Image (cartoon, helix red, strand yellow):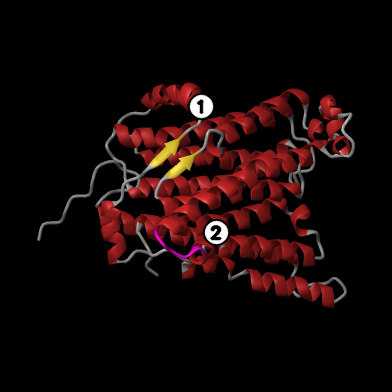
Amino acid sequence: MGYIGAHGVAALHRYKYSGVDHSYLAKYLLNPFWTRFVKVFPLWMPPNMITLMGFMFLVTSSLLGYIYSPQLDSPPPRWVHFAHGLLLFLYQTFDAVDGKQARRTNSSSPLGELFDHGCDALACAFEAMAFGSTAMCGRDTFWFWVISAIPFYGATWEHYFTNTLILPVINGPTEGLALIYVSHFFTALVGAEWWAQQLGESIPLFSWVPFVNAIQTSRAVLYMMIAFAVIPTVAFNVSNVYKVVQSRKGSMVLALAMLYPFVVLLGGVLIWDYLSPINLIATYPHLVVLGTGLAFGFLVGRMILAHLCDEPKGLKTNMCLSLVYLPFALANALTARLNAGVPLVDELWVLLGYCIFTVSLYLHFATSVIHEITAALGIYCFRITKKLEKKP
């Protein structure tokens, strides 16, 4: 199955990235550091290799979380928290300098943008698992993934319509990640148990606030992130898309239709967990976040590709491929409700099948698109030199 047609190939040749970062932290502190750090890499180092190396830091971090806290509800050794923080800092650094390396080596391309943002989409899942082990979130780990995935999807959706990636003064890739790796380092000092306490015990300032002081600290952080980060960000995304759609006399219904697969994905997984006889998300948090994170990565990647190839606005049919497995999973869980709690197929095997399906779907998409873009633009994915044109 090909993903890029003749119109898409022509659009790839015309495409120019446009982005604005209003973050003061990036402008005055991190960007000067990144500008110096990029010089560590030799000029022959391809930007996509830097991106991949940064992504592997988070894969390593999530593996540490799995080894020392399989259900993300027990405290790992304190050095693991420090490792989580360091690996996330390195991920942020490598993610920031890959673009600088591309400009430094004159190798910027649409493939670089897709590769970078595609890894970032998957990073939401792997960092959620790492933070889940730090804060002993258990089943709430899934919700920490959700609050990172929603703004990411919203930003990608907005970028598709506005043609400019706008990062506000306080944004996830800069301040958000900085807050998380500082949290990891802080936990290395005080221990993971700090997150399991009531908020009034962890932060005495809140001890006098009724109801709030009795909430578990990790859950209180989740609620605050939803209220002060996710909701304002989504409102910002919708407002910007609405302005663009109105100015072009387009259809907001078609614009909102692109959110449909993501909403169905989240709803489907939550219904599956509700029907499951084994408390799915709490029992296997890593597998649920991994499988759903890969399906999310496919949705984001498909939307980015549509933007790069200047495809017509609206729902892309093959985005729904990420949802194909869910009807089987839901039907199997439903059989447990009708059969004294015993499903037709063991839920662990169904969940493993879900992960295998989403891994296969994502790998097929990634390898196919990389091949098609490199062939169209005459470039390599992990080499800076251009392909030699074949003589007739």
Q: Is residue 303 left or right of residue 335?
A: left
> Pointer 1: residues within 10 angstroms few (<14), some, or many (20+)?
some
Residue range (magenta): 248-252
The C terminus, quarter of image:
bottom left
Of mark 1 and mark 2, the one earlier in the sequence is 1
Q: CA distance from mark 1 to mark 2?
A: 37 Å
How far across and down, in percent of the image, does residue 330 sit?
Answer: 71, 71
Give left or right: position of 121 versus 219.
left
249 is within the stretch colored magenta = yes
Q: Is residue 44 visible?
A: no
Residue 150 vs residue 229, the one in the foreground: 229
Q: Residue at x 34, y 64 (%)?
A: 4
Is 145 covered by the magenta stretch?
Answer: no
| Residue that mark 1 sits on | 24
Q: Residue at position x 59%, y 28% from top?
A: 86
What residue did someone put label 2 on? 359
x, y (%) of residue 353? 63, 65
Q: Magenta span: helix, strand or loop, mainly? A: loop
Badge nearest the viewer, 1 or 2: 1
| Number of residues whose C-alpha sits closer than 10 Å to that of mark 2, classed few (under 14), some (14–19) or many (20 or more) | many
Q: Give the quadrant of residue 34.
A: top left
**Residue 32 coordinates in the image, percent (x, y):** 43, 22
Disc 1 is placed on an element classified as helix
How many marks do you count on the picture? 2
Residue at 74% from the left image edge and 55% from the top image edge:
281
**In the displayed structure, does residue 15 sit left or right of residue 231?**
left
